Amino acid sequence: MEFAVDGPKAIPLWINGRAFLTVTPSFFDVVNPVSGEAVYRVPLCGADEAAEAATAASAARPAWAALAPAARQASLNALADALEGYAGHFAKLLRGDTGLAEAAAAADVAAAVAALRGAEVGEPGVVAIVVDATRPLAGLAEAAAPALRAGACVIVKPSPKAPSAAYALCELSGRAGWPGGVLNLLQGDTEAIAGLCAAAIDRLAYAGEAALGAQVGAMAAAAGKPFAMQAA
């Protein structure tokens, strides 16, 4: 990527178990709502990057689905343990992106840990999950964990307003020994969602406020993709 020398640090994509750099026509500045400072920026991705993420998820799915349920849960537990160990760091990321109070940020991290250790089982396949900025980490984990438990591989599209904790969780999954392609992250906004709707995914899910979810659902319906919404 090309950035201004004095510009904010960029948060890349996470595809196939590693940071994925891409050049996009435009970027979104992540602004701390308390200080007004642009703390990060993310590339506004589209169809090409969405297809790349879907290809990685599709390639990883057979081996992940072939694991025993206990083995997949062991990976989720390892990620939960690592997240709990870095709870303070993740809470700080959430506060920087969203301006959440300290207690609220800590609660978001704790809810994400609980979701990763949970028991709910979703459906297999390749699933793309759009998450808004209401509960950036907990919403992600609560939507993704059941699918991962079922043997699905996941592409997460966080809000461009609050991408830091989602990317850090993907990095943590690599440190926890997760296979590449099981958990992927696509940065962006509406064009990224449209790209996911056009990509080789089995379904689209949304976690967050209902108003935005209705818009995402309409995009999924227009593309003929199954859609599920988990309201905040």
Image: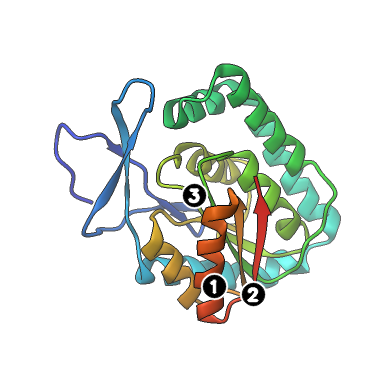
Determine which residue is flagged by label 1.
Answer: 220
Residue 34 pos. (x, y %):
38, 21
What amino acid type should be assigned to the residue bearing mark 1?
Answer: Ala
Residue 13 in the figure: left or right of residue 154: left
Report whether residue 76 is seen.
yes
Q: Quadrant of residue 109?
A: top right
Q: Nearer the viewer, residue 69 or 225?
A: 225
Q: Up-down: is 62 above or below 106?
A: below
Q: Up-down: is 110 above or below 152?
A: above
Q: How is the image coloured?
A: rainbow
Among numbered discs 3 and 2, the one appearing first in the sequence: 3
Determine which residue is flagged by label 3.
Answer: 158
Q: Up-down: is 6 above or below 161?
A: above
Say which residue appears at 57% left-offset and 74% top-offset: 201
Can you name the residue that lies furthest to the top here?
102
Can you name the residue that lies furthest to the front here?
211
Say which residue appears at 70% left-offset and 47% top-offset: 142
Circle 2 residues within 10 Å: few <14, some 14–19, many ≥20: some
In space, the residues marked 1 and 3 are separated at their CA atoms by: 17 Å
Among numbered discs 1 and 2, the one appearing first in the sequence: 1
Residues under numbered marks 1 and 2 in contact, where contact means CB atoms less than 8 Å apart = yes
Residue 184 pos. (x, y %):
53, 56
Among numbered discs 1 and 3, the one appearing first in the sequence: 3
In space, the residues marked 1 and 2 are separated at their CA atoms by: 7 Å
For the C terminus, the image quarter is: top right
Circle 3 residues within 10 Å: few <14, some 14–19, many ≥20: many
Q: Quadrant of residue 183?
A: bottom right
Circle 1 residues within 10 Å: few <14, some 14–19, many ≥20: many
Residue 30 in the figure: left or right of residue 109: left
